[in-house]
Image (spheres, rainbow, N blue to C red):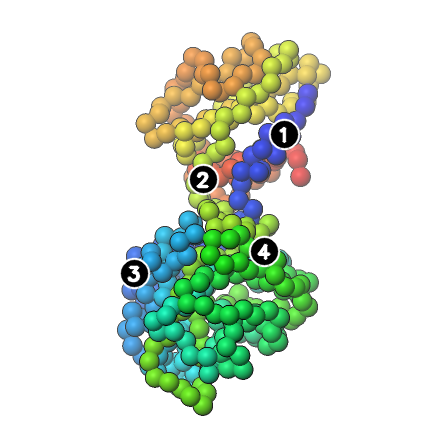
Amino acid sequence: MFAKVSILLALAGAVSAGTIVWDGRFNDMTSSADFEKWSFSTPVGSYQYYIHGSGAVDKYVNLDSTFKNPADTGSKQGAKITIDETAKWNGQSMLRTELIPQTSATINKGKLYYHFSVKTAADNAPIATNEHQIAFFESHFTELKYGGSTSKLQWCVGGVSKWEVELVADQWHNVAYEIDFDASSVTFWHSTGSSPLTKTAGPFTTTAASDGKDFHIGVLRLPGSNDAAGAEDWFFSGVYIESGDLTTSFTGAGDSAGSEKPMVTSIVAPASSTVAAAPSTLVTRVASKAVSVETPVASSASATVSTVVTIETPAATTIPAVDPSVAPISTATPVAPVTTTTLASAPTASVGVGSDAVLPEKFTIKQFIVWLKAKQGMN
């Protein structure tokens, strides 16, 4: 009797670090017209769109694959957010175009990571004479700023600069605000281009307060003494909020419920003299890989149940069976196939606990690990 801890660790190592609790990477949109489907009476889509000027939506927000960080493989496209002299909202003198997360998820409690990448370009570059507030909360407990008193891009906590860098055209700045709403602290993670995020500043104590509806993705430019006419463009990519451990890379960043990721290559269970009990078989369709995992059973005979997870390609209709009369074997060498007609239920965000745990039809490696631990009674 033993738990296959090594297999669990191997699977865990293949999983993205955290779980996406809100996904704003624009992958669910085809054009900027999708933003106009949202209203306070019809709260659909990933974003609230109401802070903008009087022009058409494509005057202020546009989507395209060329607007994203090329290193961000989790995003299909990015957004170009524009302000000009028409971008005045609600009678204010400030120029602003901003998007706000539309979600019922809890994004204002516990420790969360607010991810985004931002850049400017040589065309329609922002003027440094005016202060710009970028990716900010209503209370401004954390935000990026540019211009005004300095020509550098700054990260600020409560309006006080804690880090700064030159704003260079077409250089992507990748950011994660590590916000601990319960402990009232914030930490800044940053990188450029395709480099993984590193802890750059913090943690700093602050009044981390949000109602979950006040994170502004976009730009607000304050009026100044030299309010030049013309457009300014800011590009955003890889916008999402993550719980758990921080994802620092950009290749398949984050793990959201229902997303599909390839499983690890087949794992061969070691030879054993233990007689295996009748196997239980679970089938799902995601990719063409197979994993054999042994789990202990509470019995004086020290029997081992071999739980076989078979990942089929769409054309496959059979799964390998495990012969209960021999020691557990690798699923890379299948024995007499049996036909299955029963699939698991539709994917859910939770797999339950204990013997009631249910693995979705489509599942990520992370969901499989949670399910397996629940089956084994592991914390």
Q: Say if mark 3 contacts mark 4, CB within 8 Å.
A: no
3D distance between C-alphas at marks 1 and 2: 21 Å
Amino acid at dot 2: Lys
Instruction: Answer with the quarter of the image where residue 379 lies.
Output: top right
Residue appearing at x 58%, y 33% in the figure: 10
Amino acid at dot 4: Thr
According to the picture, the residue beneath numbered tag 3 turns out to be 31
Residue 214 percent across, percent down from the top left: 50, 70
3D distance between C-alphas at marks 1 and 4: 28 Å
Q: Between 117 and 185, which is closer to the camera in this rendering?
A: 117
Q: Between 345 and 74, which is closer to the camera in this rendering?
A: 74
Residue appearing at x 39%, y 58% in the figure: 68
Q: Is residue 176 above or below residue 229?
A: above
Q: Between 1 and 353, which is closer to the camera in this rendering?
A: 1
Amino acid at dot 1: Ser
According to the picture, the residue beneath numbered tag 2 turns out to be 261
In the picture provided, is 119 more to the left or to the right than 327? left
Q: Earlier in the sequence, mark 1 or mark 2?
A: 1
